[in-house]
Structures are given as C-alpha cells and as structure tokens.
Amino acid sequence: MNAQRLFFSCLLASLIASPILADEITVEGVHLCCGKCVTGAKDALTDVDGVSRVRVNKTKARVVFEVKNAKSAQSGLKSLAEAGFYGKPSIEGPKFEIDKTAKKDAVSVENMHLCCGGCFRAAEKAAKSVEGVAEAKANGDDGTLQLTGSKISHAAVLKALHEAGFHGTVK
C-alpha cells in the first residue's frame, strides 16, 4: 500500500513539473463579428512561440489559448493586439503607451482589423462615442479608421476602441 502511494505521489509530482502542462489564457470581449474575424484572431496566434490550442468563440466574443510560460502569454496578447484585436485578458496584459495629453482635430487609427461591414460599423460607433469626434470612417483596405472633429483625445479613442474589442495605433 505504501509503495503504491509513493508511486502515485511521484507520478503526480512529475506531472505538475512537466512542461507539457500549460496555462490557459482567456481574452473576453474581443470584436468577432464574422468568420474572417475568427480566422484573423486564430492566425494572429498561430505562429507565436509557446502558444498552442487556440480557440475562438464568435458567439461569446472570446479567444482562449494555452501558453508555456509568462513570456509566451504576453507575446500572444501582443500578437492579438497587433492584428487589431483587443479584449480583457485573464492575466495582466501588455501596456500600450499613448500620449494622454494628445488632442487633434483629425486622428488616424492604423493597424486595425476591419474585414467587413460589421467591423466598420462597430469601430465607427465606438469612435463616435468619444467627445469631439464628429465623423468616423473605417477603411478595410488598409485597416485604418479616420476621425475628424474637434480636440479628439488619442487616449479616449484608444479606450473606446478597446472597450469595443479593437486595437490600433492612434496617430
């Protein structure tokens, strides 16, 4: 009986220390309105070192993936953002530096995932919720969102887009 307990204790200890066990990262609230969004989110994580078992759920606006370590978790979240997707991760994600004092009458947001009318409408709606934005025009050909108005805050634009499940570079 004691030999059996020892065996199972050793087995359990080796499994816990095993590199095949991975942590799961969940990102909630990602903008996923169509099949191209789902494919785009999956593709963003496909070649990230240390990321595996990527699952994207359009209905729940959720991206889930497994990681080997903290570095691969941050790399996965960064890659997702670089592909134009954003959401609330189950761990602390990367910080995106933005000048909180920057305000312009014309603002461009680049590197967004804008594949269809659903993306256009959602991004434009999010941007129009920002004080000072009079007009918002999404362009799927180059992944940009052009904003015009008065004293548009770069930080407020990024915050509104993040809340809508998008990421981009605000200029």
Image (spheres, rainbow, N blue to C red):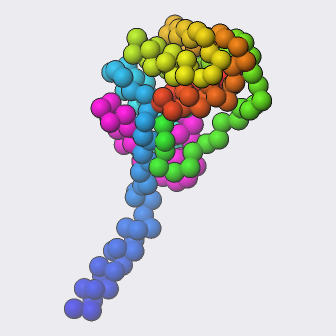
Name above or below for residue 53 compared with residue 59.
below
Q: Position of residue 122 (x, y in %)?
A: 45, 19
Front one among 134 and 104: 134
- State how many labels appear: 0
Q: Is residue 154 left or right of residue 130?
A: right
| Whether residue 155 is visible | yes
Name above or below for residue 171 compared with residue 44.
above
Q: Is residue 162 within the magenta segment?
A: no
Which residue is situated farthest in the bottom direction here? 2
Name above or below for residue 117 compared with residue 48.
above
Q: Is residue 154 left or right of residue 72?
A: right
The residue that appears at 46% across and 13% down in the rendered structure is 120
**Residues in magenta, as a range:** 52-79
For the C terminus, the quadrant is top right
Q: Position of residue 32 (x, y in %)?
A: 39, 27
| Whether residue 84 is visible | no
For the N terminus, the quadrant is bottom left
Q: Quadrant of residue 11?
A: bottom left
The residue that appears at 54% across and 27% down in the rendered structure is 161
Front one among 47 and 143: 143
The residue that appears at 39% across and 74% down in the rendered structure is 13
Q: Quadrant of residue 98?
A: top right
Q: Position of residue 117 (x, y in %)?
A: 40, 11
Front one among 153 and 27: 153
Q: Position of residue 56 (x, y in %)?
A: 35, 35
The residue that appears at 61% across and 42% down in the rendered structure is 94
Q: Quadrant of residue 46?
A: top left
Which residue is situated farthest in the left direction here? 1
Q: Is residue 58 within the magenta segment?
A: yes
